[in-house]
Amino acid sequence: AGKGRTGTVIASYLLYSGLFTSAESALKYFGLKRSTTINGVTGPGQRRYVKYLEQLLSPNGPEFPFPGAPFFLKTLTLSYPPGVAGGVFVVLKVIELSKGKALDKQEELFCSSWNELPHAWPDPVVPLEDHRTLAFTIDQVIRGDILITGEHASPLGRLGSEQFMRLQFHTAFLPPSSSQQIVFTKKDLDVTHVDSRFDANFSITMEFGNKPLLTDPIQE
């Protein structure tokens, strides 16, 4: 207790106050003072957002106002997914956390399970011949704080389901290109980074493409 969220806030304050000039040094200092194991903040997502603050404080960092330019997310591909006895059925969700409004607003942009919510649609997992890849077609515009979760759906329903992956990021800090691929490795993913059932080469690849954006949803 007192290392994750608390450490994120303290490391961010150390950066903002000018006591440290890099996220890594602020996080390391907190770890040295808080824990005998020098671990401190270990969650990849929390560490990522401290590094976002470092970028914001730098002269060449992203400019306000947030949330920055939108991105058209075409596909998400999971490489080297985990093996589960009896097979694995991945329920993948893409959630927009803020939508430029109240911080507690969440909008589910995509869900790969057809029976999750009324506005979700079927998009079955597509295993390739080597069974090393699971691909999902997303085709959604994302903007701001984004949360991607992966869950193994059990025949027992929610009682037997298990979340195995969480990835949170902000689109304002993505490279400014409308057509690209961005890869997050095992060490970048919450929950997954400490799960020994996952291959060391496990990763999630986001593929972006071009889509005409006729209106700015933040201005509507």
Image (cartoon, rainbow, N blue to C red):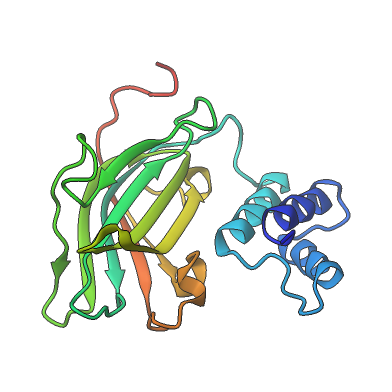
Residue at the image point whose x is 44% and y is 36% from the top: 69
Residue at the image point whose x is 80% and y is 57% from the top: 21
Q: Quadrant of the C terminus?
A: top left
Residue 23 vs 138, above or below: the answer is: below
Foreground of the two, 172 or 148: 148
Foreground of the two, 139 or 102: 102
Residue 150 vs 170, above or below: the answer is: below
Where is residue 50 drawn, in percent x and y?
67, 54
Residue at the image point whose x is 72% and y is 74% from the top: 39
State left or right for residue 197 relative to residue 100. Answer: left
Q: Which residue extends farthest top?
A: 220
State left or right for residue 165 relative to residue 215. Answer: right
Q: Quadrant of residue 86?
A: bottom left
Where is residue 9 drawn, in percent x and y?
74, 50
Where is residue 64 drawn, in percent x and y?
61, 32
Number of marks present in the image shown: 0
Where is residue 142 drawn, in percent x and y?
37, 40
Foreground of the two, 199 or 90: 90
Residue at the image point whose x is 64% and y is 68% from the top: 42
Q: Quadrant of the N terminus?
A: bottom right
Residue 76 vs 40, above or below: the answer is: above
